[in-house]
Image (cartoon, rainbow, N blue to C red):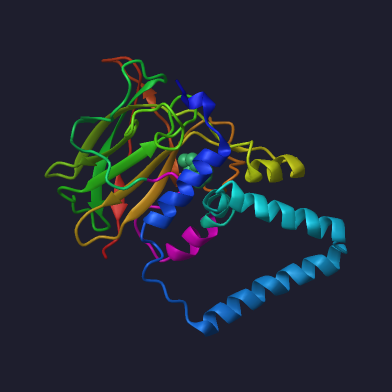
Amino acid sequence: SLTEFDAKAAESGNAATERFRDSGKTAAIEVPKERVSLLANEVLSAVYETVRKHKVSYDEFNALKAWLINVGEDGEWPLFMDVWVEHVIEEVSTEDREGNKGSIEGPYYIPGSPELATPATLPMREDEGGTPLLFQGQVRAVDGTPLAGAKIEIWHADDNGFYSQFAPGLPEWNLRGAVIADADGNFALNTVQPAPYQIPTDGACGKLIAAAGWHAWRPAHLHLKVTAPGHQLLTAQLYFDGDQHLSDDIASAVKPELVLNPSERTDAAGNEVTYDFVLDAA
Ligand code: MBD
Ligand code: FE
């Protein structure tokens, strides 16, 4: 039977493409034609400038055309957009926030994960690899008010760097859950520390990385969406101090405020860390 190690770029790419199509994210969008014209003209002008500046050849033009076709065939447009573009969209759309720093959603979020009361344990296999991690904290408003019943959705890769529903052989909701905080906004959840993550190397995005001599790594990370009534959705990622890819994340999505420094538990195996979330009013 297939395991996570049999994951293929085109499978996770096409799954991410299907997920995006079904997400409803584009259903109500109508971009005014003035805005389309402005943005398309500016992006194309930047391309012309690069072509003239570096005297781009027909061979290079054709290599690009072939590669763009491959991105679509491998279903990797969501991966490409989230790795190389989303960070700057996230930056401009959250620049007015006073509360928590956030980060990009990435291609592997799935809504509707199982709701779990605090203290929670994320769904995981009996022999799930990785250092156990107790992650706890409080959700508050900018003025310090605890946000009762806040929801902390969390999803992350396993100890081998694979996400459930995007690699074969993993239980459907493995390492995905929605923890409901208590009346004081406090939450605690048990999981395992994820491993550093390499974006698929056998698809079009991997081909770009190899052709350019880059690396495919993201630092190990937890993905989160934190919500409470009357407050703005916080989409974030949390990283781990000492990770060798904090300073060269392929997705440019690390911020210093998002780095955890877990300590070893004295009462049980594994590590523990406390991190509080501060949500802006809606
Ligand atoms: C990931 O796990 C991720 O978080 C991002 C942003 C891109 C690719 C894979
Ligand atoms: Fe991720």
In this rendering, position of residue 164 left or right of residue 60 = left
Q: In the figure, 248 relative to 31: above or below?
A: above
Residue farthest toward the left in the current orientation of the protein: 183
Residue 78 on image: x %, y % = 52, 52
* Residue placed most toward the observer, 119 or 261: 119
Q: Which residues are magenta?
A: 87-109
Residue at 44% x, 50% y is 18
Whether residue 138 is in magenta: the answer is no
Instruction: Residue 192 in the image: state x and y as whole percent.
Output: 37, 25
- Tell whether 252 sits left or right of 93: right
Give yes or no for residue 94 being in the magenta stretch: yes
Residue 223 found in image quarter: top left
Give the residue drawn at x 67%, y 37%: 215
| Residue 104 visible in rendering | no
Q: Is residue 73 visible?
A: yes
- The quarter of the rendered structure image containing the N terminus is top left
What predominant SS class does the magenta segment belong to? loop
237 and 258: which one is in front? 237
Residue 23 position, x and y percent, is: 37, 56
State which quadrant residue 44 falls in. bottom right
Whether residue 95 sits left or right of residue 147 in the image: it is right
Q: Quadrant of the image for the C terminus?
A: bottom left
Q: Vertically, is 2 above or below 37?
A: above
